[in-house]
Image (spheres, rainbow, N blue to C red):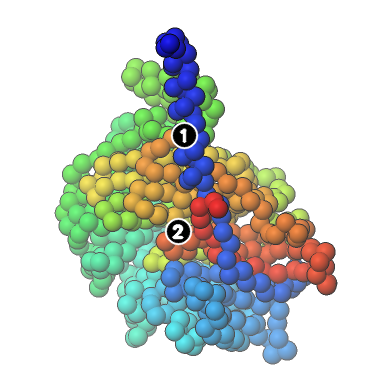
Amino acid sequence: MSLPISNRYTLLFILLLLVLSICAESNAQKLKMEHRLELPFNFRDNLDMSVLSLEEKGFILFLDSKDKTPYGKREYRFMKYDKNFQLVWDKSYMANSNYIIKQYSFDLPYLYFLIDQNRKENVLMRLDIETGTLFFTDYKPNIDLDITHFQVVQNIAFLAGTFNSKPVVVQLDLTTMKERSLPSLNHSSKYIDAFEYDYANNNLMIISKGKQGRRDAVFFNLYDFKGDLRYNVALPNDDEYELETFRPYFVSTKEQLIFGTYSLTNRKKSQGIYALKMVEGKKESIKFYDFVYLNNFFNYMPAKRREKFLDKARKRKKKGNPKSYAYDYFVNPLRFQEDRIIFSLASYYPIYPPNNSMLHNPMMGNFGMPNRLHQYPFSGYNYWRHNNYLNRYGDPNLMRNNHSVIYKFNHTLICGFDTEGKLLWDNDFKLEEFETIDPNSFFDYALNAKDQVLMLQLNKNEFVYKETYKSIANFNLKDTLIHTADTVETIVDRRNERIEHWYNDRFLFSGFQYIRNPKNSPAKRKVFVIYEMYAVPED
């Protein structure tokens, strides 16, 4: 006796659900925390702590004590740990109390810090990563340069910024301390939008926006290692769109790809992402990807709302009246995996608190916050001051807002491109709505197998871990919540906690915590904590 057709489909559907359930169960992940390191810390101490990643070589823990010694000095302490959290060396040095660290840059085997001593004098501090030896050099620029970018390559420092509201790039030979200004920067620009060094071919690309006659334009300047101009070209804005942010990828000295966000003319909100191909200083092609045509961009919306929104947006675009979007975006530095170029951005809504007061944030505590050096990719340059997030995240609005901003995040987009600039896949991750003054403090992502993305987010007292493959929709993601400490312990208060991609599929977590453990004596402890995190299959 055979089952009716309707019953057969019902049985088949139940079996399919069972198979999917078994597969999901077999692929379930959990987060593992290893090598927990704690350093005692008193929240009343005038002390900053920062973790500087060395990728697979470990990390450097930097302690900056702002309490003056009897001799009017301050203490810098550096501790190097290997990837197993074993201490390699521990060095302490005295520095002038008026030193303010602005930015830092790796030039292996050295780590350079740019220090502001007063308004017109700087200090370059060089740390030998292998030995822990520290060396100071005074540097007085020939012009009063407001420095926004700092990078050292083969003992040559590039310092970029503005002078008299015009962009300037200074090349400084750290052996002779002789400097020169790079030629042919466009003086109608107000600041530098992108500053990227090509290590493979020893090229430096400077991108800025300004005027060409009466038209707005984007200016591309390419220099060799000596600071000589290879080419400069102006790309006038189109009547329909405007390029907003820029992330260059160097195919060769002759060919570059630039990725970023674009807006519709006069709307000033990101409409989608683009891939621009430049060959010998000329635009060869440009591809535009409106957010509405991406596979997963609007997955942060509930399903019914998303379908209605996309249907209306596509109809409007076909009629020549595309819908504009409400969020601004931070654009992260490019990452690379085999023949893939990974481009990512995070949406946020800016909040301008009255009188620059900071709203309460559970990640920052109720009582001020120690400063920390911002952590960025090992091969890249790094930025210290709040208004320099333009350089890290490519958002032009940040340079125009010279006051405190709180960023309310919504979601992040991660895309895979080939080396021709063709979009291969995209995936969107909804971020638990979160407000912070530090865009990089609470989430990061890693690339595991080819086209596989792992994302880790810190949400109050829990971690959210998600992974996906290419453009698999968000509802297929694995989502794991865990607490930030053992179940016996309670985190009474916290400050400035961060998640950073470390190497491969590993993440580093660090932050200030006030922990209560009734099994210990004393029951409470205040610590700066660091530990490694990664995902493993469920038992």
Q: Secondary structure at mark 2?
A: loop
Q: Camera-side residue: 88 or 178?
A: 88
Would you identify the image quadrant in which residue 213 lies?
Answer: top left
> Residue beneath label 2, please?
505
Dot placed on the residue nearer the N-terminal end, 1 or 2: 1
Question: Who's the residue at 42% across and 19% down the image?
Answer: 311
- Give coordinates of residue 444: x percent, y percent: 50, 53
Of badges 1 and 2, nearer the viewer stands 1
Q: Is residue 356 left or right of residue 139?
A: right
Q: Amino acid at mark 2?
A: Asp
Q: Secondary structure at mark 1?
A: helix
The answer to whether residue 4 is above or below residue 52 is: above
Q: Is residue 347 left or right of residue 419?
A: right
Distance from label 1 to label 2 (Cα)?
Answer: 26 Å
- Give coordinates of residue 12: x percent, y percent: 44, 22
Determine the residue located farthest toward the front in the rendered image. Answer: 1
- Give coordinates of residue 533: x percent, y percent: 54, 60
Q: Amino acid at mark 1?
A: Leu
Q: Which mark is residue 66?
A: none
The answer to whether residue 223 is above or below residue 455 is: below
Residue 120 visible from this viewpoint: no
Question: Who's the residue at 25% across and 60% down the image?
Answer: 222
Q: Quadrant of the N terminus?
A: top left
Query: Residues at badges 1 and 2 in contact (C-beta under 8 Å)?
Result: no
Task: Give the class, few, some or many, for how many residues have Cα within 10 Å of label 2's Cα (few <14, many ≥20).
Answer: some
Question: Who's the residue at 61% across and 41% down the image?
Answer: 433
Q: Camera-side residue: 484 or 409?
A: 484
> Residue beneath label 1, please?
20
The answer to whether residue 299 is above or below residue 357 is: above
Question: Who's the residue at 57% across and 75% down the image?
Answer: 62
